[in-house]
Image: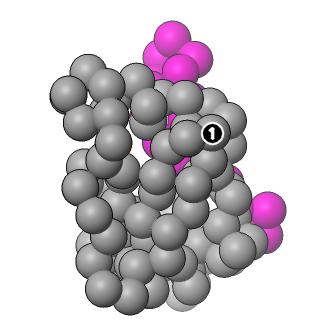
Amino acid sequence: MVTISDNAAEKSREILSAEGKGEWGLRFYTAGSSCCGPSFGIDIVETPVDGDDVIEKNGTKFFLDKTASEKLNGMTIDFVDDGEKQGFVINNPNPPSCGPGCGSSCG
């Protein structure tokens, strides 16, 4: 199961409200892959796509396509704002090791 942090839920609610779409949700989907693993995208959507997993956290809806849900299993979607960087991040308690040929690109 994917966990949504309180910070991610709060920031999502702020984003949706600012867009005038407070009843909509954020959809996380797989957007490609590399030797370091999958890449993910985020969209603001009104309803889930058939087959999406739906998570509700603190009144905010999150939709995950099946592949994203499988790849993010056991991970946490969080939002960070530390002054130098701001955005959604995926925290993996068991990050994969970099495969041959990746060099430092997976850091």
Residue 87: within the magenta? yes
Colour scheme of the picture: one colour
Q: Residue at x 30, y 85 (%)?
A: 50
Q: Residue at x 25, y 49 (%)?
A: 44
Residue linked to disc 1? 58
State whether residue 14 appears in this view.
yes
For the C terminus, the image quarter is bottom right
Categorize mark 1 by other alpha carbons within 10 Å: few (<14), some (14-19), many (20+). few
Which is nearer the eye, 41 or 45? 45
Residue 56: quarter of image: bottom right
Task: Name the spot of residue 104 as percent of width and height, x first.
Answer: 51, 61
Q: Residue at x 20, y 28 (%)?
A: 19
Q: Which residues are magenta?
A: 78-96
Instruction: Give the left or right position of residue 53, taking residue 91 as reference.
Output: left
Task: Name the spot of residue 95 as percent of width and height, x first.
Answer: 71, 68
Residue 3: within the magenta? no
Which is nearer the eye, 5 or 58? 58
For the N terminus, the image quarter is bottom right
Count of numbered badges drawn on the protein: 1
**SS state under label 1:** loop
Name the kind of residue labelled 1 in the image.
Asn
State whether residue 8 appears in this view.
no
